[in-house]
C-alpha cells in the first residue's frame, strides 16, 4: 500500500507519514522544505520517498505525480494535509495577501493534488482520499474569516467527491480537528510570534499530531464497504459553543 502525504515535514503531516510508514506502508512524503523530511527517510529508509513540493503550483504537482517511480506510482491513499492559517484580524482589517495564500494552499493546493491523483484511483477502483479540514469550517469565531471559509470548502468538496465517486470503491474522508498543539500552526498564524502562539495553548491539553495520525489510520482500516464521511475531533478542553452575544452598555434614563 502506498500513501501520498502533503505537508509531511512537520505537525500532522509528519505524524501521519510516520504512522503509515511504521505500519509497513510505503509513503511519498511531500513538503516545500525537503530538508525537513530527512528524519523520515533516516528512520524508515527506502519505505519513504521524500519529494519537494509546493502544492500551490499545479504543474509541479502534475509533474511529481506523473514521474513517481514505478514502485510508488499506484497510490492507494492521498492525504491532503498541506494547509495553514494566517492572522486573526477581523475581515475589515485582514491582510489580503494572507487571504490569498490561504486560498491558494488550503483550497487550490488540495484541488491540484486531488485532480492529479484521483483518476488513477478510479482506474484501479480502489483508494482513499483523506482531506484535513478543521472545525473552523463548521463553527465560526472572530478572526477565523478566510481560514474558516477555506476549511468549509474542504468539508463540502469532500462530500461532493463522494457523490461523484458513487459506484466506485474509492473512499473519501474529511478529518476536522479543533485545537491542536505541538505543531507550527499557531506560530505560522502569528507570523513567527512564538509568545502569542504559546498563549493559545496556555492551561489546555490540546489534540496532538499523533491523535490526528491515529484518526487517519483508523478511517483507512474500516472494512472496504464502510466510508467515514467526516470526523469532527475536539480535545475535552474545547467545545463548539456557546454562541457569542455582544451587549451594549446604555445609560439609564428614567
Image (spheres, rainbow, N blue to C red):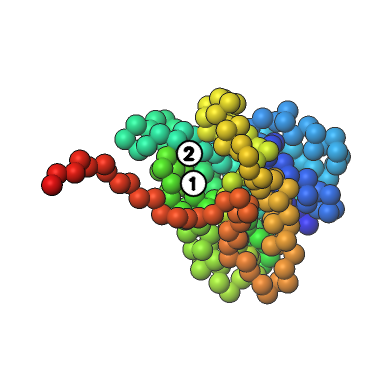
Label placed on residue 88: none
Mark 2, residue position: 102
Dot 2 and dot 1 residues touching (CB under 8 Å)? yes
Label 1 packing within 10 angstroms: few (<14), some (14-19), many (20+): many
Q: Which quadrant is home to the N terminus? A: bottom right
Q: Is residue 146 left or right of residue 54?
A: left
- Name the residue nearer the viewer: 145 or 27: 145
First in sequence, mark 2 or 1: give its number. 2
Q: Is residue 41 left or right of residue 98?
A: right
Residue 227 percent across, percent down from the top left: 63, 69
Mark 1, residue position: 107
Residue 97 percent across, percent down from the top left: 42, 30
Label 2 packing within 10 angstroms: few (<14), some (14-19), many (20+): many
Residue visible at 61% across and 36% down in the picture: 202
Instruction: State which mark lies toward you, 2 or 1.
Output: 2
Q: Is residue 53 above or below residue 73?
A: above
Label 2 – label 1 distance at C-alpha: 8 Å
Amino acid at each position: 500500500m502506498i500513501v501520498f502525504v502533503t505537508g509531511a515535514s512537520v505537525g500532522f503531516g509528519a505524524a501521519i507519514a510516520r504512522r503509515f510508514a511504521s505500519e509497513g506502508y510505503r509513503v511519498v512524503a511531500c513538503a516545500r522544505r525537503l530538508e525537513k523530511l530527512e528524519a523520515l527517510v533516516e528512520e524508515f529508509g527506502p519505505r519513504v520517498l521524500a519529494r519537494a513540493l509546493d502544492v500551490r503550483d499545479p504543474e509541479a504537482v502534475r509533474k511529481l505525480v506523473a514521474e513517481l517511480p514505478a514502485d510508488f506510482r499506484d497510490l492507494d491513499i492521498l492525504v491532503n494535509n498541506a494547509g495553514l492559517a494566517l492572522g486573526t484580524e477581523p475581515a475589515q482589517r485582514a491582510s489580503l495577501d494572507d487571504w490569498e495564500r490561504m486560498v491558494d494552499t488550503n483550497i487550490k493546493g488540495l484541488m491540484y493534488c486531488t485532480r492529479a491523483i484521483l483518476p488513477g484511483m478510479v482506474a484501479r477502483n480502489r483508494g482513499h482520499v483523506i482531506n484535513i479540514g478543521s472545525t473552523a469550517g463548521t463553527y465560526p469565531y472572530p478572526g477565523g474569516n478566510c481560514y474558516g471559509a477555506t476549511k468549509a470548502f474542504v468539508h463540502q468538496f469532500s462530500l461532493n467527491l463522494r457523490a461523484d465517486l458513487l459506484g466506485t470503491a474509492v473512499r473519501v474522508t474529511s478529518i476536522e480537528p479543533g485545537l491542536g498543539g505541538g505543531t507550527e500552526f499557531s506560530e505560522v498564524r502569528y507570523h513567527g510570534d512564538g509568545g502569542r502562539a504559546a498563549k493559545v495553548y496556555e492551561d489546555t491539553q490540546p489534540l496532538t499530531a499523533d491523535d490526528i495520525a491515529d484518526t487517519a489510520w483508523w478511517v483507512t482500516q474500516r472494512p472496504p464497504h464502510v466510508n467515514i464521511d467526516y470526523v469532527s475531533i475536539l480535545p475535552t478542553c474545547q467545545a463548539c459553543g456557546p454562541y457569542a452575544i455582544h451587549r451594549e452598555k446604555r445609560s439609564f434614563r428614567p
